[in-house]
Amino acid sequence: MTPQDAVWWKSAVVYQIYPRSFADSNGDGFGDLGGVIDRLGYLEVLGVDVIWLSPIYPSPQADNGYDISDYCDIDPVFGTLAEFDMLLAKIHECGMKLVMDLVVNHTSDEHPWFVESRSSRNSPKRDWYIWRDSRDAAEPNNWGSFFSGSAWTWDPTTGQYYLHLFDRKQPDLNWDNPHVRKAMQDIMVWWLDRGVDGFRMDVVNFISKTRGLPDAPGIPGHRFVIAVDEFVDGPHVHEYLAEMSREVFANRDGEFITVGEMPGVTPDHARLYTDPVRGELDMVFQFEHVSVDQSPTNKFEYLGLDLVVLKAALHRWQAALAETGWNSLYWQNHDQPRVVSRFGDDDPAHWAASAKALATILHGMRGTPFVYQGEELGMTNYPFRGAQDHQDLEAVNYYASVLDLGGDATAALAGLATMSRDNARTPMQWTPGCNAGFTTGDPWMPVNPNHTWLNVESQFAATDSVFAHYRTLIRLRHNLAILERGDFTPLMGQDPQIWAYTRRTPGKAILVIANCGRKARTVDVDAEWIGAGLLLGNLPDTPITPTSTTLQLAGWDARIYATGSADRSECAALDHAF
Ligand code: TEU
């Protein structure tokens, strides 16, 4: 085994907490660090290894903390540095690790760096951000913001525009300036010295823009376009990340994890980012599989799900990083709708089976699985009734821009209900009671009305809950080396309803097979699976051993079978573990 094979995060499972929606300890309606401390026992029962906290730094909260005004403190809405230290100590006591969310592409416009930068054209911090003159009395180029409108805002004090790929309150830093890079490295060192175990880095493949900031190819009917070719995986990004990793992690003892969030990343770049020899990052979040049901020019235009396309997207990434690099595995995060509503079936008759089937498919793959809060319960999208229910600035701006342009408001609201980030941000459902046990005050986001039956308390009482299934999958990840190391071979790639693949190490094999639909299906598998042992199923009467090459799969039936010595020796370890 080479040292790269031995890294701890290859058999770990990460849990993402969106602190403002997780648990509120002081009754102000916002989740906080005290709430996380109170619920650490829950995460211990689930069995996850790493907790990733979405941003908790001081922030005007224009984008719920992804607009940071001080990188070395805690926003009062979440708590204090003393509480943070206590949380970190308790996480370590429980044998878990903590990953901070670091937003390095941009700051808040209220960060002192930007305040100084915008104060004068001669400010020493002027070049820390991206300032340009107007062109023909308009924006410097045709780049659009991810949050609607232009990516440029005019600053009357100094008579120039500044660039913001996201909201106008999130000005982009100029990473070509070595002082900016050094400042970010210092911040990372500050948190590592405090004891954190790594970083999830927000849109970190956007930090290097094409020199000269050229116009992007126009799209008919669009005044501004998201200029991906001019900032995704840009000219110096690998150099800057390698430098960061060298300056921050070289000669530091400990076990760390770094994950780069990378919209639009290609497999070829991902291989470079995660090649251990190059020393840039441990893994990246790619976006291909969470884009398959969206129009390429408008994420709120829902295209419906084609399972063949979804499978191909994830299989492509399994193949791309098979030899070099490493995948992250995720269905959800705070930016994505709930997976059981999106790729599963949230009708009460199929909800639990489909949530478990999707979990089985993802956790059987090669890579490090990420679980987003509430996913382990099968939490669903929110039943939005109209524009007034949306809070996220992306949703609010999008709706306003559709109205502005005289577009179809009904279609826009339907798109928001299906795809908006608000779906992921409703409070965690702890109990069937008032506000789902999230807060004793008024929750900042409404609680999903289905908390009366979909909650932690009721799932703890059942042995066949979605939660129990996730718990088992996490134990399998810890106990079965084949899940970490086995190679990956897709089966039945063109089947529009069946998702199947094998994982193999010498002498051992597992089959993951799932029916991704309501209708029962008969599926032919290879003779090698006759006599295999069931490692995990999601329905009550799953056959323990296939007795023929024909499997009868009920709706949303998902199974993992093991052959060879895999099941006997490793299941013995499992018996022990449960
Ligand atoms: O998201 C980056 C991103 O490009 C998208 O996932 C984003 O959510 C948007 O919907 C694109 O249409 C990261 C953070 O995860 C997100 O919460 C922040 O809003 C964004 O960066 C800016 O910091």
Image (cartoon, rainbow, N blue to C red):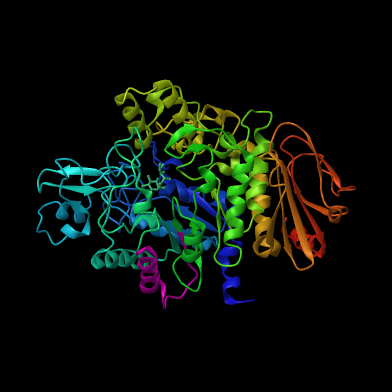
Outermost residue, bottom direction? Answer: 251
Residue 173 visible somewhere in the drawing: yes
108 displayed left or right of 50 = left
> At 33% from the left edge and 33% from the top edge, which residue is drawn?
397
252 displayed left or right of 184 = right
In which quadrant of the rendered image does the C terminus lie? bottom right
- Nearer to the camera, 81 or 133: 133
> At 50% from the left edge and 39% from the top edge, which residue is drawn?
428
Q: Quadrant of residue 574?
A: bottom right
- Nearer to the camera, 44 or 217: 217
Residue 379 to residue 246: above or below: above
Number of dots carrying numbers:
0
Residue 256: % across, % down: 48, 67
Query: Magenta stretch: residue 509 in it?
Result: no
Residue 287: % across, % down: 49, 49
Query: Which quadrant of the frame does ligand 1 lie within?
Result: top left
Residue 460 visible somewhere in the drawing: no
- Nearer to the camera, 427 or 36: 427
Residue 258 to residue 340: above or below: below
Residue 568: % across, % down: 82, 62
Range of residues picked out in magenta: 236-259
Residue 232: % across, % down: 39, 54
> At 47% from the left edge and 61% from the top edge, which residue is drawn?
269
In which quadrant of the rendered image does the N terminus lie? bottom right
Residue 344 to residue 325: above or below: above
